[in-house]
Amino acid sequence: MSIQINHLTHIYNPDTAFQKVALDDVTLEITRGEFLGLIGHTGSGKSTLIQHLNGTISPTKGEILLDGENIHQNKLKTKEVRRKIGLAFQYPEYQLFEITVYQDVAFGPTNLGLSKEEIHENVVSALEMVGIGTELYEKSPFALSGGQKRRVAIAGVLAMNPEILILDEPTAGLDPKGRDEILAAIKNLHKERGLTVILVSHSMEDVAKLVDRIVVMHSGQIAMSGTPKEVFSHVEELEQMGLAAPQVSYVCKELRRKGYAIPEDVYTVSELKEMLLQMLQEKGVSQ
């Protein structure tokens, strides 16, 4: 399932003193099975863009095509669009409300009118995908850790069997353990289920490790698009937009300044680790 965004413009409070152009003539294609990272400074248009993708808000101008069909052309299909495109807002655990973990994840499938057997299958599958074991099914979601709550909330979206998953800052506010749990779950979802994933994040490290392509938003427009290596090679341009490269890029820059032959396109910790180990081996230093 592909998404084609054509000349999308969104204006908040049009024709008033508070008018704000949040999106300005955005055109973008997201292909089936792609892992896309969406980055940009606060106010760049990221959140407005993703809310358009599942019909949460409507464009001022332009269109969004889901497999070639305009999602706003037939209001009766809005429910189907939101089933196919699952959107987990920032801090989705604030939306948890049921008595047990199982019931919370079952809420969406139940509203779809599925049979009890189908609901159970969807709930168990979704919880397994995010690494929540059966021992937690009957616990209150409010008794879980921050990382577990976040995974349960994402499972609630997955239980609707979406073909496209949009995650808005999924690691925000979590401790390192919770971050690692969420990132591992997202990576496995993309790899094992073949979901199209759109990850909105302020963490350049998370984006660098996970995505196939990065789209950089700035002032309501697409300022840059490319692979992580391509995008993070433009450090100065990113900094002018209030962003930065992954922290390891700055470590690499300092190592190059000190005379180490570190390539310009190293931007993850694992890549730098391999590079340094290789240098040590070449110098005959045992690990």
Image (tube, rainbow, N blue to C red):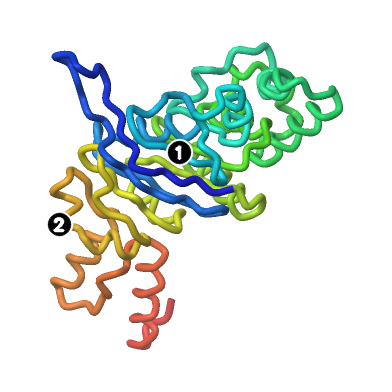
Residue 44 appears in which quarter of the rendering? top left
Judge whether residue 38 can be spotted in this image: yes
Judge whether residue 175 can be spotted in this image: no
Which residue bears the numbered disc 2? 236
Q: Residue furthest right?
A: 117
Residue 202 shown left or right of residue 73 in the figure = left
Residue 10 image offset from top left, x and y in percent: 31, 29
Observer-side mark, 1 or 2, equals 1
Q: Residue at x 36, y 36 (%)?
A: 62
Mark 2 element type: helix
Residue 56 shown left or right of residue 15 in the figure = right
Q: CA distance from mark 1 to mark 2?
A: 32 Å
Q: How many marks?
A: 2
Q: Earlier in the sequence, mark 1 or mark 2?
A: 1
Residue 172 appears in which quarter of the rendering? top left
What is the three-letter code of the residue carrying label 2? Glu
What is the three-letter code of the residue carrying label 1? Ile
Which disc number belongs to residue 64? 1
Which residue is nearer to you in this view: 236 or 246? 236
Q: Residue at x 70, y 18 (%)?
A: 111
Which residue is nearer to you in this view: 259 or 154? 154
Residue 282 appears in which quarter of the rendering? bottom left
Mark 1 element type: strand
Which residue is nearer to you in this view: 32 or 133? 32
Residue 249 image offset from top left, x and y in percent: 26, 61
Which disc number belongs to residue 269? none
Residue 54 image offset from top left, x and y in percent: 50, 31
Query: Which image quadrant: the C terminus?
Result: bottom left
